[in-house]
Image (tube, rainbow, N blue to C red):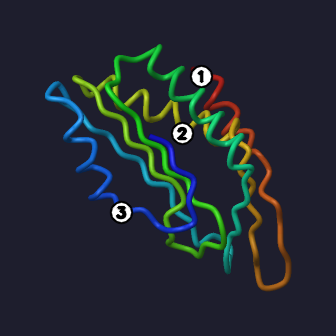
Amino acid sequence: MIKIQKEDFNISNELDSINILSDNIGSVVSFIGKVRPDNNLISMTLECYETMAVKEIEKIINKAKNRWDIITATVIHRYGKLYPGDNIVLIITASEHRSQSIEANQFIIDYLKTEVPIWKNEEYSEHRDWVKTKESDLLSKEKW
């Protein structure tokens, strides 16, 4: 399941929806990305090209399913104006065994950070900055 949405997500509801999918689920891994309160950040505005973002996330999930034996994957990414402490992204992977869902989850976030057309503009008291792709994010993706 993929959702691009303005409103926050409810982790408990999303986990409940995973649990009813299969009797074979032995591992559920979740990752929540949040707005960090770094350097006196006031807010972060996320913009996206929704149709393209969904297509890219589908490709990433399909790559993960081809590489690991995951039963399901959920990606929810928010857009709009967010504040320090707000949720940005939720990734849930489920499989029979923990190593499969752990690795698939990390793969999905590493690719999501570099491949999906979602842009972040950070607002500080005296300036705004578009967030550029970090070298560390590119290196994380390359390890796969």
Alpha carbon separation for disc pair 3 and 1:
31 Å
Mark on residue 50?
none
Instruction: Point out the tag, 3 or 2, that comes first from the N-terminus.
Output: 3
Q: Residue 143 appears at what percent x and percent y? A: 59, 22
Q: Residue 127 appears at what percent x and percent y? A: 85, 78
- Vertical relation: 103 (above or below) 129: above
- Vertical relation: 70 (above or below) 136: above
Q: Amino acid at mark 1?
A: Lys
Determine contact: label 3, label 1, CB under 8 Å: no
Q: Identify the residue shown where x is 50% and y is 55%.
A: 33
Q: Residues within 10 Å of mark 2 (few under 14, many from 20)?
A: many
Mark on residue 109?
2
Mark on residue 10?
3
Q: Identify the residue shown where x is 78% and y is 85%.
A: 125
Q: Residue furthest front?
A: 51
Front position among marks 3 and 2:
3
